[in-house]
């Protein structure tokens, strides 16, 4: 066993040094002074109204098209309650966010994975799957995808928007990483392209911190009314205290600076990851994202990540189970590398350990 410090390429958590602690202390004080009796009380299941108003203006929609919840993952759960009966078909990208896959299965959905390419889902595979059956919804992460790091091209977004109308299915656009673009041009969201058939989710977890648990759902007002009823029957009201704090943080103009700070922190980490992969693992296939938290690596032919994960432990390197991201099997050579919570030095060291591990596994 190595005595080197452990390096974790496992969970996609934000860097603790990114948390705006002082600004959140100030926002908490103001929020309690201004709204104490409201945010310590039960309230609307749609969330704290001033925050919803701020979020509506941010995206240029009306307030009845915004609902806030305790984290965006819980919104996915509400949407499962609304849309899914056991046996219903849902499409996801393959690979996709493993917690969503778990939730879909928990609701009895039949999950059909549409292969993901560097520029979004494979449209031919999608059209072939649609010939069999239209899904209740297609869950996608078009920007800096978790786990692959892929971003959907404009052409594919337009095609998705058109197919949703033609076949009558919803697009569930999960976009927690969208504000974290380090370079390149932002593409329109699916919600901008097809607001009638898209439910757009955002989250403050990767912008301020996961602690306050503030997730956001944008969508048609009549559908949000139904989601608000499910939310009410689940928790009466989300945590208005933390929603009030996040509101004050945003309303005092801190969000743009915070996002700029995150990009300045994370962009060099992404670059360190790409440089280290070019240097240490040049024959692995790597996604080259322009933002977000993750990139992914497909190991050379014949190299199984199960063996690599096991062997990596001897180098004090922890890797996530790549196969868990694949709804219908596959991913035997797939590794997700979350880089945000590691320093450039740790990233270089971690990838050099990964390369040494791959070499050992290949040499048998
Ligand atoms: C794609 C995706 N959706 C949702 C979540 C969960 O976000 P929240 O903390 O808002 O529940 C994550 C967290 O990693 C994620 O990567």
Image (spheres, rainbow, N blue to C red):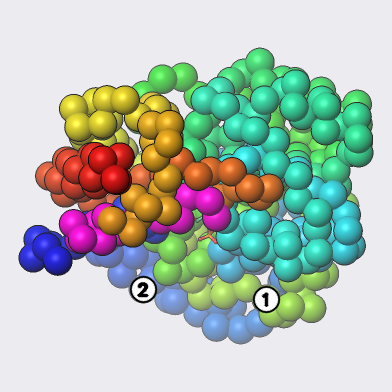
* Viewer-side residue, 175 vs 343: 343
Question: Disc 1 designates what residue?
Answer: 237
Q: Which residues are magenta?
A: 312-324
Q: Looking at the picture, how far across and down is residue 352, in whole percent?
A: 17, 41
Quadrant in the picture for residue 138: top right
Number of callouts:
2
Could you tell me which residue is drawn at 78 percent across and 66 percent down? 107
Give the structural element (helix, strand or loop) at label 1.
loop
Q: In this rendering, is residue 129 above or below 224? A: above
Question: Disc 2 designates what residue?
Answer: 29
For the C terminus, the quadrant is: top left
Residue 332 appears in the rendering: yes
Could you tell me which residue is drawn at 73 percent across and 68 percent down? 106
Q: In this rendering, is residue 279 above or below 114? A: above
**Mark 2 surroundings: few (<14), some (14-19) or many (≥20) residues within 10 A:** some
Could you tell me which residue is drawn at 55 percent across and 55 percent down? 324
The numbered mark at residue 356 is none
Quadrant in the picture for residue 263: top left
């Amino acid at each position: 066993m190595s005595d080197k410090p452990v390096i974790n390429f496992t969970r996609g958590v934000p860097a603790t040094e990114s948390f705006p602690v002082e600004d959140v202390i100030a926002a908490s004080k103001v929020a309690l002074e201004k709204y104490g009796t409201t945010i310590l009380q039960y309230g609307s299941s749609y969330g704290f109204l001033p925050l919803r108003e701020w979020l509506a203006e941010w995206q240029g929609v009306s307030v009845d098209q915004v609902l806030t919840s305790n984290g965006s993952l819980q919104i996915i759960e509400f949407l499962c309650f609304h849309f899914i009966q056991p046996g219903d078909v849902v499409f996801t990208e393959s690979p996709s966010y493993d917690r969503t896959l778990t939730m879909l299965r928990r609701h009895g959905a039949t999950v059909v994975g549409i292969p993901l390419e560097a520029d979004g889902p494979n449209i031919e595979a999608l059209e072939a799957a649609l010939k069999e059956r239209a899904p209740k919804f297609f869950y996608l992460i078009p920007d800096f995808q978790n786990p692959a790091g892929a971003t959907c091209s404009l052409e594919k977004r337009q095609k998705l928007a058109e197919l949703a109308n033609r076949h009558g299915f919803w697009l569930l656009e999960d976009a927690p990483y969208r504000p974290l673009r380090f370079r390149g041009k932002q593409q329109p969201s699916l919600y901008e392209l097809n607001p009638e058939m898209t439910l757009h989710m955002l989250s403050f977890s990767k912008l301020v911190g996961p602690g306050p648990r503030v997730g956001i759902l944008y969508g048609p007002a009549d559908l949000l009314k139904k989601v608000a009823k499910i939310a009410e029957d689940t928790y009466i009201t989300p945590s208005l205290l933390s929603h009030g704090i996040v509101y004050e943080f945003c309303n005092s103009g801190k969000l743009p600076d915070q996002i700029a700070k995150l990009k300045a922190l994370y962009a060099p980490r992404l670059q360190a990851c790409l440089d280290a992969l070019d240097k240490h693992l040049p024959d692995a296939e790597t996604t080259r994202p322009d933002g977000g938290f993750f990139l992914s690596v497909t190991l050379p032919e014949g190299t199984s990540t199960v063996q690599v994960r096991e062997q990596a432990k001897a180098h004090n390197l922890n890797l996530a189970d790549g196969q868990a991201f694949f709804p219908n099997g596959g991913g035997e050579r797939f590794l997700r590398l979350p880089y945000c919570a590691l320093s450039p030095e740790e990233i270089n060291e971690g990838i050099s350990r990964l390369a040494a591990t791959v070499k050992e596994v290949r040499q048998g």
